[in-house]
Amino acid sequence: MINKIIAIQGNHPATLNQKTDTSIFLAKEAQERKYKIFYYDPKDLSVIDYKVIASGFFIKFNNTKKKFFKIFKRQNLELTKCKFILIRQDPPFDMEYISSTYILDSIQTKVKIINNPTSIRNVSEKFYSIKYKKFMPSTLFSQNIIQIKKFFKKHKKIILKPVNSFSGNDIYLLSKFNIKLIKKIIKKHNFIMCQKFLSKVDKGDKRVFIINGKVCGVISRVPKKGSFLSNLSKGAKPINTSLTSLEKKVSNLIAKDLKKDNIFFAGIDFIDQKLNGDINVTSPTGLKTFYDLSKVNLAKTFWKELKAWKILPIN
């Protein structure tokens, strides 16, 4: 008999936005398929007598506005008893995050884990984009002030991004060289990603959804007035859109590569037909927003594709 438990490793449900959250959207579809949902925080992972145990609770999500979930039973669960495990906690991609992937590595042959913990470590959300540099705006990865200053002098207006952050946090637009700010970011984050500013971001970026090596959908996110950040969490407005022929070509190329690297679910972003370098693999978002705009339910696609998904040997 197939074990009908799905574990979600993530931030507490009370912190999630039920209107837009992808984890909730995926969990609700799993419930429709008669799965039980077990939720736990990564800090509550343990290895006890060589068994991976999570301290968490069974939960059921519903469609009421005020109380959109109910916790049924708190317990310790051996995670190999699950059919699937979804890694859905927010970055930063710090040592706690990495340590949780090492723990889950030990059971990845016994339960399907999405995204694969080994692959999450190998596929850096920013550095992975280096292989696609010809499709990107001019980009520098460094923590060297001299190199960053040279890059700024060349482009006059640049974006600074930490390599391991998320949701538009600690991203700055630099139109005047500010060494104090740069040193502050480097002290906090070490390596940073510097990128030539693309002014057409005010028209919106494009978020592309990739599931099991397939390009499955896209939305545009238009920054709020006066902002250059296209993250929905920063007030951007989602709208329907489509991909250009170039964007389709690049998306399909990346989707193929991600599948080879055992990444099942990912999101990539374009600004003015240029890849912006964010290959979201730790906790991709946007599926609920895509559904609200298009009425296409990619949660159904997710669970259908996952049944057939197999880990590939990494060269």
Image: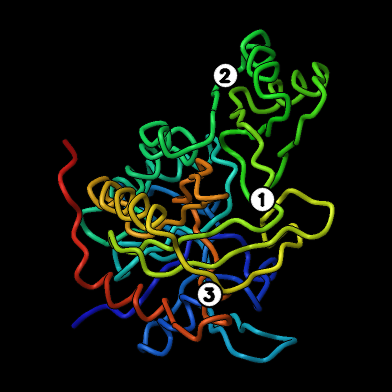
Q: Residue at coordinates 66% horizontally, 78% vertically from top-left?
A: 19
**As drawn, 212 above or below 174:** below
Residue labelled with disc 1: 201
Estimate how packed mark 3 is, as few (under 14), some (14 to 19) or many (20 or more) residues with alpha carbons within 10 Å: many
Q: Secondary structure at mark 1?
A: helix
Q: Residue at coordinates 46% horizontally, 72% vertically from top-left?
A: 38
Residue at mark 3 to residue at mark 2: CA–CA distance:
35 Å
Residue labelled with disc 2: 142
Q: Quadrant of residue 21?
A: bottom right
Type of the residue with mark 3? Phe
Name which of mark 3 and mark 2 comes first in the sequence. Answer: 2
Does residue 270 appear left or right of residue 171 in this picture? left
In depth, the one of 35 and 138 nearer the eye is 138
**As drawn, 246 above or below 127:** below
Q: Check residue 290 in the rendering and tell me which mark sits there, or answer none.
A: 3
Type of the residue with mark 2? Ser
Position in image of residue 4 (x %, y %): 32, 80
Q: Quadrant of residue 63?
A: bottom right
Position in image of residue 88 (x %, y %): 50, 59
Type of the residue with mark 1? Val
Position in image of residue 286 (x %, y %): 55, 67
Residue at mark 1 to residue at mark 2: CA–CA distance:
24 Å
Estimate how packed mark 1 is, as few (under 14), some (14 to 19) or many (20 or more) residues with alpha carbons within 10 Å: some
Q: Quadrant of the N terminus?
A: bottom left
Q: Secondary structure at mark 3?
A: helix
Q: Quadrant of the C terminus?
A: top left
Estimate how packed mark 2 is, as few (under 14), some (14 to 19) or many (20 or more) residues with alpha carbons within 10 Å: some
Position in image of residue 181 (x %, y %): 80, 24
